[in-house]
Amino acid sequence: MKHVLATGLALLISTAATNAANLTFRIAGDAETFSDLGEQLQAASLTASAIGEEDTTRREIVAAAQADYARLLAVLFEAGYFGSEISIRIDGTEAAELPTIGAGNPVGEVAIEVRPNARFMFGRATIAPVPPETEIPDGFAPGEPAGTEIIRDTVEAGVDAWRGEGHAKAELAEQRITANHATDRLDAELRLAPGPRLRYGPIAVEGAEDVRARHIARIADLREGRVFDPDEVQTSASRLQRTGTFDSVSIREAEGIGPNNTLPMTITVAERLPRRFGFGAELSSDEGISTSAYWLHRNLTGYADSLRLEASVDGIGGTVSGGTDYGLTFGYLRPSTFNAETDLYVNGGVESLDEPNFSSDRVFIDAGARRIVSDAFEYSYGLGYEYSETDDALGTRSFSIFSLPLAAQYDRRDVALDPVDGYYAELGLRPFYGANRAGPGAVFTGDLRGYKGFGGEERQTVLAGRLQLGSVIGPDLEDVPASTLFFSGGGGTVRGQDYQSLGVELDDGDTVGGLSFVGLSAEIRQDVTENIGIVGFADFGLVSPDADFTGGDSHSGAGLGVRYNTGIGPLRVDLGFPVSGPEDDGGVGIYIGIGQAF
């Protein structure tokens, strides 16, 4: 290593005084050209870190400085600066010449000086063989800046391309890298060894205790004899993790190739504790307190199948929520029942609702299949039955309804409880037949949400929007259960308006739910500190007596809110005020919960 004292133009990166040691970090050359390089060098320096810590000894500073020669040189090579010079002096003596074990006197001055050579450009830049349509990094080409990072990325791209073709043991066989200091050119010739195309061999399962090993292999679905695919291996691991039964999942390839060009695979899992309890609560000034608690078993019968029992009590102490609502539901899910990507679900429950405009007692059950298409997209289909007794302004009625529940969900939010970017869409269609009075029909629902963050990397400002749709197609109002009809007002629709205050007004002045609903919400969310944010919002709702969203009444509300980051999601406090509507009484609504409003 050459030891130089840089002269000429120098960029002062930092000067610090800690533990009686002053650090000067300089890079010779044009300040604008080397500003990014200087930041990378300082970030890689162990010496800078050591001096910045309390109670650092002279021995530790000397050891860090001696290690920095290789670390700083690696940063220079990554950026294409070959033949550069580095000097690290401790109290005027080059660190490489100091003993690590020496005097215990404190360090006074540390000077790190770097003189980058000219940046090298690629002369020849070749990699072969590679599969057709392999995407080689754009920077690996003659005339482009050279560096070890772009060479490494190119090798990785070539190896990944071969692995994607089933050549799991593809590797770099040879590299010829020649630096011409007279012309500042770097020639890089890379040769890959694809190896044979491999198929999955025997699949072993390790770590299984309560979950059946055969079902773990079924969920993974790496079928013996199928051509190796790294994306399929990643999908298999994600599918196992998605069951919620395992703390960790890894899928390893065997080091060696098995007979007949096969590749044995090992699935290693660590199981979670099978049982879990949880609870939640929300508070609204008009809807009162809503509480829920659940019990979850993650592996009920050894097939990574889950059973969730949940009890809820809503409307406690609400001023306009009617009475108190009670519910007891269950949800059963058995992964990879019909095939690797299709689960069995059974959901059901009983509920008793005492709402402002109706009361209802209902028992229901749905069973069907859930298809996981990707991490973002899933859909489900099944059969359902419900029996309910309804009492509202249209009279007391009983319903016995068979249905075909269909649903699809596409979720591209970055964080579910506090999204900054992305979008979410959930659509539902439930064709039904009422055995005693509803007749044929269908219920359509939609929930569309979008988010866009601004303000650089921190994205401190977020614009959020939501569109809710609902429509009951087919029967008349009196032939639909009250719990299926649509109302607007309250925390889930229009904040600032009373809970379920908007519906369809009958000739006698009573209110029932509508056959269609449109809800619009917009928010601007602004971070004030790391943990505190403020929100401005506006909501709109329309309820129509017809299924085609025509006619009917609308209302709106607006307000301000505060968010506090709890680590598991923001604590939400919103104050909503009515803006327009047929029953604008000028009041204020207070809404408290965990997570954003949408």
Image: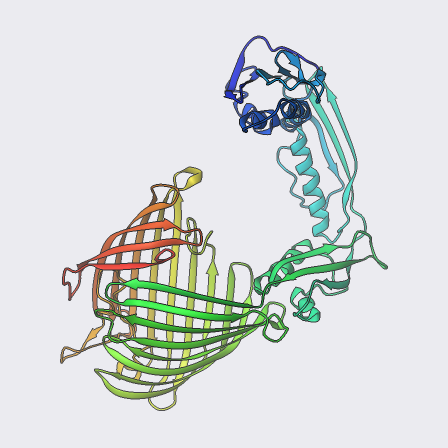
Q: Quadrant of residue 395?
A: bottom left
Q: Quadrant of residue 280?
A: bottom left
For the image shown, how many numbered marks are present on the structure?
A: 0
Q: Is residue 472 left or right of residue 245?
A: left
As displayed, is residue 60 above or below residue 352? above
Quadrant housing the C terminus: bottom left
Q: Nearer the viewer, residue 534 or 95?
A: 95
Q: Is residue 288 visible?
A: yes
Q: Is residue 193 left or right of residue 468?
A: right
Q: Is residue 491 visible?
A: no
As displayed, is residue 489 above or below residue 362? above
Residue at x 64% of width, y 29% of height? 78
Residue 357 placed where, x, y %?
A: 23, 77
Give the colouring mode of the picture.
rainbow
Q: Is residue 201 left or right of residue 59?
A: right
Question: Which residue appears farthest toward the bottom when viewing the image?
Answer: 436
Residue 554 placed where, x, y %?
A: 21, 65
Question: Which residue appears farthest toward the front when viewing the image?
Answer: 104
Q: Quadrant of residue 62?
A: top right
Q: Is residue 81 left or right of residue 203?
A: left
Q: Nearer the viewer, residue 486 or 273?
A: 273
Quadrant housing the N terminus: top right
Residue 66 placed where, x, y %?
A: 68, 23
Residue at x 14% of width, y 79% of height? 507
Q: Nearer the viewer, residue 333 or 257?
A: 333
Question: Which residue appears farthest toward the right when viewing the image?
Answer: 259
Residue at x 82% of width, y 54% of height? 257
Q: Nearer the viewer, residue 45 or 401?
A: 45
Residue 119 placed where, x, y %?
A: 63, 21
